[in-house]
Amino acid sequence: MARHKSEIVIVGAGVAGLVAAHECLERGKSVTVIDRHSAEDVGGLARTAFGGMALVGTPLQRRMGIKDNPALALSDWLSFAEFGSADHWPRQWAEAYVEQSAERVFDWLRDKGMRFLPAVNWVERGNFLPGNSVPRYHILWGTGLGLVERFAALLEAHRNSDKLRFVFGCRVEELVADDGRIAGCRGVIEATGEDYEFVGDQTMVATGGINGNLKKVRDNWYWGDAPTDILNGSHPYCDGAMHDVVEGTGGVVTHLENMWNYAAGIPHPFPRFENHGLSLIPCKSALWLDHSGRRIGPEPLVTGFDTHDMCGRLSSMEKPWSWQILNWRIAAREFAISGSEHNPHIRDGRTFSFLKETLFGNHRLVRQMQEESDHFIVADTLPELVAEMNALNGDDLVQLDHVTAAVQGFDDNVRRGPAQWNDDQIRRIVHARAWRSDRIRTCKPRPLLEHGPLIAIKLRLITRKSLGGIQTDLASRALDRSGQPLKGLYAIGEAAGFGGGGASGKRSLEGTFLSGCILTARAAVDSLD
């Protein structure tokens, strides 16, 4: 068995692993980073992430007149999290997050040369439970891919880069114990079958969550029986294997039932693995219909308020898919796809092009989806639209009279004018448009049928992030069943449920993931001093 020794062994080269490696080099420590991906895919899921971060009390918030502070943010966090009495470490991490995110994420990234868009968005406002009381969603110029590339460049140019070694294409299968402590890990180079042992003084697990493993997702589904059809918005390598390894070594894994899935997925037009999906940012002004064409209600589904509740409602429906009905005007203003792949202007820092699409509509993306996705249907009339919806399904489940009733009922309400609007979706649209960052991306209510062509999008639930994971203390040390640290073992990022085995509880305030990776990684390395 080939053997390699360094002071620090990091399993996983996502954002948490890269940040931890950087901070270790800053302290002059030798580091080995092991990842199952190839070198071209360093950064893991962050490469495809949109790059949004929930941050508290930043200069950008103050510039926009947003009065935020850690106490308010913690109140919102606890409302959404619904922690239980045993959730000591998740709550500790929630408190640490709201206290530290401005200095240890926002300021720190700017010191590293990263920039944020000059606007703060307002997401997860809450339905029946208070969510974000104020806007907190900061978006990185360059998206998640820019974050990965920046840290890859920092590592390459670091004065201690000779102390860093990457091993790609390696599947870690077990942890190595020596004299009562974790002293590294063993893995297999998948291309050759060669066994390898990595020995270190400290080992950090940074392998992500379980949401790329649809069997584990279904086994841990929160809302009863899981839908028969779920798309994979994570990656098959995020399979929870290291959770099992840590648990088998005496560690504790908690709250895998808490996940951050999304309600609006479509199959990726160019899939890279089985069930590969794209996560859409559903339009607030679109009508959300069930499999037969009835408007979902009585409380209409509107994005931006409570993703957890939305996923739960769709999970309990008769069929594992739903529809959104909108028109080209709405799509050009509101339609978006989460991630770096379909946001090239933000990803590549094209300020003028980004502003142009924001002001005049993203017709480019709408046309792209019309050409590439059979789940994105465009037609001139409702009968034509319904016919194509049923053709896609290969059945006659969508009823024209149901769709007509939903659309005409909504249009009639809009035509009555603002003084007589009596529809909760319209009320939420008006509320969203009151915040200037959302006004430019949310249409003023107008009748759907007066602004063709019409669009129907067939949607499924899509996985993304695990909110639970390996239980850790505030130093990111993995804990055993008695609550004591497992000597030599740390867990960071999504593998640790972004801190404590589930810092977000049942719901995220959205944008707590990349920033949670940074905070947990930095905490782990700080504790080495």
Image (cartoon, rainbow, N blue to C red):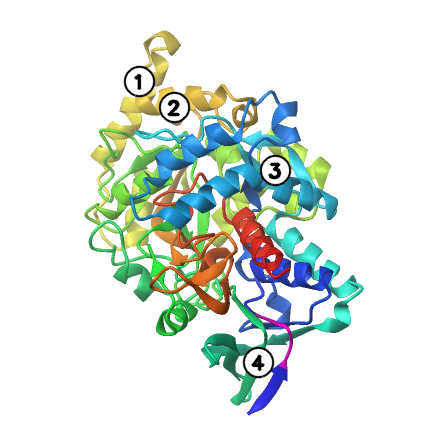
Circle 1 Cα neighbour tier, 10 Å, few/some/many (<14 / 14–19 / ≥20): some
Q: Of the residues under marks 1 and 4, which one precedes in the sequence? A: 4
- Residue 464 x/y as whole percent: 43, 54
Q: Of the residues under marks 4 and 2, which one precedes in the sequence? A: 4
Distance, label 4 to label 3, CA atoms, is 36 Å
Of the numbered discs in the image, which one, if any, rests on residue 102? 3
Distance, label 1 to label 4, CA atoms, is 67 Å
Callout 1 amino acid: Asp
What residue sits 69% from the left and 38% below the top? 353
Q: Give the structural element (helix, strand or loop) at label 3.
A: helix
Residue segment shown in magenta: 5-9
Q: Give the structural element (helix, strand or loop) at label 1.
A: helix
Q: Which residue is mark 4?
A: 198
- Residue 152 x/y as whole percent: 69, 61
Foreground of the two, 95 or 278: 95
Q: Quadrant of residue 247?
A: bottom left
Callout 4 amino acid: Phe
Q: Which residue is mark 2?
A: 428
